[in-house]
Amino acid sequence: MKAKIVITPKKAVLDPQGKTVQNALALMGYTGVGAVHVGKYLEIELTGADKDMASRQIAEACHKILSNPVIEDYRFEIE
Amino acid sequence: MKAKIVITPKKAVLDPQGKTVQNALALMGYTGVGAVHVGKYLEIELTGADKDMASRQIAEACHKILSNPVIEDYRFEIE
């Protein structure tokens, strides 16, 4: 199994990295680019077979270690 | 429209950040965790209406600015 996790800054939080990418794209001549949000992507290979258990563990790990829940949102899927 | 881009290190490239997360998870007592890959996630809001055009532009931007094609792979979808 594999967990795919996406961690993004919350909408209300300033995202200077996203703003920088947005400006860079505009300067490079890409028109029609609006807001850019930059986050993290994690792929975790899981050796267990119990999908529910894995899902609980990943949710806990996301909350406790992988993201900062004060300023970041996370979502994940197990495949 | 919105482009969702995932940039990951190529499999052959050393991923110290992923290895660190893997070790941290193991130390925190999460069993059954195999290899971890850490990449970037970008969400770009697009104001145009032409999906094919947007797709070409995003592919070019990924290749030229957003990723380092020597050591990173990217994939994206436009929704």
Image (spheres, coloured by chain):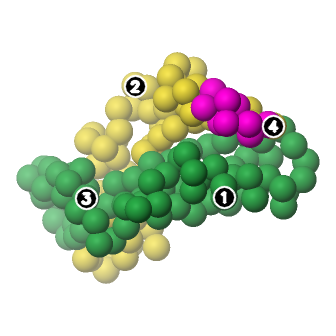
Chain colours: A green, B yellow
Instruction: Tell me which amino acid carries mark 2.
Output: Val
Say which residue appears at 52% left-offset and 61% top-offset.
Answer: A74
Tags 2 and 3 touching, CB below 8 Å: no
Q: Which residues are magenta?
A: B23-31
Badge 3: chain ID: A
Give the chain letter at badge 4: B
Residue type at numbered disc 3: Asp
- Name the side, left or right, on which B28 lies relative to B58: right
* Residue picked out by circle 3: A15
Q: For numbered disc 1, what is the local secondary structure?
A: helix
Looking at the picture, do discs 1 and 2 lie on one chain? no
Name the N-terminal-most of marks 2 and 4: 4
- Give how far across and how far down residue A22 sits, in percent: 19, 58
Element under label 3? Answer: loop
Q: Quadrant of the N terminus of chain B?
A: bottom left
Reading the image, the residue beneath label 2 is: B70
Q: Amino acid at mark 1?
A: Ala
Between the residue at mark 1 and the residue at mark 3, the CA separation in whole angstroms equals 24 Å
At x 66%, y 41%, the residue is: A44
Q: Which mark is residue A59?
A: 1
Residue A58 or residue A76, whichever sits in front: A58
In this view, the residue farthest toward the bottom is B49
Q: Which residue is mark 4?
A: B32
Looking at the image, residue B11 sits to the left or right of residue B2; the answer is right
Judge whether A71 appears above or below A39 on screen: below
| Front residue of A44 and B77 | A44
Crowding around mark 1 (Cα neighbors within 10 Å: few <14, some 14 to 19, many 20+) is some
- Could you classify mark 4 by the number of other residues whose Cα lies within 10 Å: few (under 14), some (14-19), or many (20 or more)? few
